[in-house]
């Protein structure tokens, strides 16, 4: 919020009173849907002028202020939901959450745990927001009971969200997938886990990158005879 300047000298009293009087004529319904910083500055300055003039603030001015504040951009996120789901013998599991808008929400892997002595193809997992109330967790191989922890972030209406995955296939160290164009300086990439089909750590561990405004890349440490699939979300503000 801008910092207001010092009060105007009383030598400007007549001009101040005239300008302050004009504020009552402003119709709050005529304000722009997305006020600019300048319009907010003007409103705050007008309030300062009214205070200097000695005229009590009218209800219309208070209403105008509230209307302007209500139209300021929403915060970066509106809710965060924490939960978990269990992967069983079938290699998948689901967790139920409070309803969210899938076009404004992303899911994030917070870790996993198991009491079984098992291989990495059963514990490298993905998390996907299947619908507005369901998160699906999965591993390539079932058999061990794995508890997967996640959170769902509900973003403000001002952001756009994309979700997807990159599959690094047999014999390859890297892969890319195409996304809808984003502004690189205003978009950030968030991992959502990965799945592998072999118990070899060099194949399991992969990293993500925003290769360009229209592509996401993934890389792993060794060529293998199996596929590593890496899941992600992209949020642009």
Image (tube, rainbow, N blue to C red):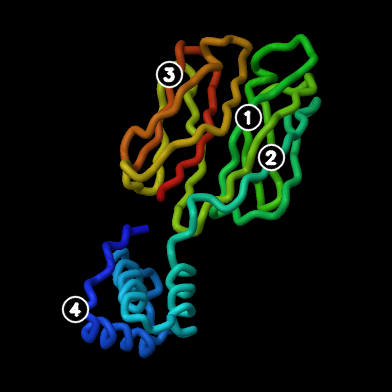
In space, the residues marked 4 and 3 are separated at their CA atoms by 78 Å
Secondary structure of residue under mark 4: helix
Residue 82: image tag: 2
Nearer to us of marks 4 and 3 is: 4
> Which residue is situated farthest in the left direction here?
11
Q: How far apart, in angstroms, are the residues tagged by discs 2 and 3?
A: 35 Å
Which tag, 2 or 1, sits closer to the chain's start?
Answer: 2
Distance from disc 1 to disc 3, alpha carbons, whole Å, reads 28 Å
Label 3 element class: loop
Residue at the (24%, 71%) spot, across then down: 8
Q: Position of residue 154 (x, y in %)?
A: 58, 50
Q: Tell me the residue that label 3 is attached to.
A: 172
Instruction: Tell me if residue 43 comes above or below residue 182 in the rendering.
Output: below
First in sequence: mark 2 or mark 4? Answer: 4
For the residues labelled 2 and 1, say whether their Cβ atoms are less than 8 Å apart.
yes
Cα distance, mark 4 to mark 1? Answer: 63 Å
Front label number (4 vs 1): 4
- Dividing the picture into quadrants, the one containing residue 31 is bottom left
Q: In the drawing, what numbered circle is on residue 11?
A: 4
The residue that label 1 is drawn on is: 110
Mark 4 or mark 1: name the one nearer the start of the chain.
4
- When the figure is inspected, residue 174 is found, relative to residue 232, above or below; the finding is above
């Amino acid at each position: 919020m801008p910092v207001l300047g010092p009060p105007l000298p009383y030598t400007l009293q007549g001009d101040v009173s005239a300008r302050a009087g004009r504020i009552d004529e402003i119709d709050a319904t005529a304000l722009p849907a997305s006020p600019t910083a300048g319009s907010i500055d003007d409103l705050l300055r007008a309030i300062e002028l009214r205070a200097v003039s000695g005229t009590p603030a009218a209800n219309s001015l208070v209403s105008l202020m509230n209307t302007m504040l209500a139209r300021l951009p929403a915060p970066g996120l509106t809710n965060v939901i924490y939960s978990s789901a269990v992967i069983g013998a079938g290699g998948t599991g689901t967790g139920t959450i409070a309803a969210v808008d899938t076009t404004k929400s992303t899911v994030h892997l917070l870790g996993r745990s198991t009491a079984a002595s098992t291989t990495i193809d059963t514990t490298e997992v993905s998390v996907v927001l299947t619908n507005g109330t369901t998160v699906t967790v999965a591993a390539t191989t079932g058999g061990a009971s794995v508890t997967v922890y996640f959170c769902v972030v509900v973003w403000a209406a001002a952001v756009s969200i994309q979700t997807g995955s990159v599959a690094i296939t047999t014999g390859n160290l890297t892969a890319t997938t195409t996304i809808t164009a984003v502004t690189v300086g205003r978009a950030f990439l968030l991992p959502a886990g990965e799945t592998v089909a072999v118990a070899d750590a060099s194949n399991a561990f992969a990293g993500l990158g925003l290769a360009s405004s229209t592509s996401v890349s993934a890389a792993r440490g060794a060529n293998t005879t199996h596929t590593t699939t890496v899941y992600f979300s992209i949020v642009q503000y």
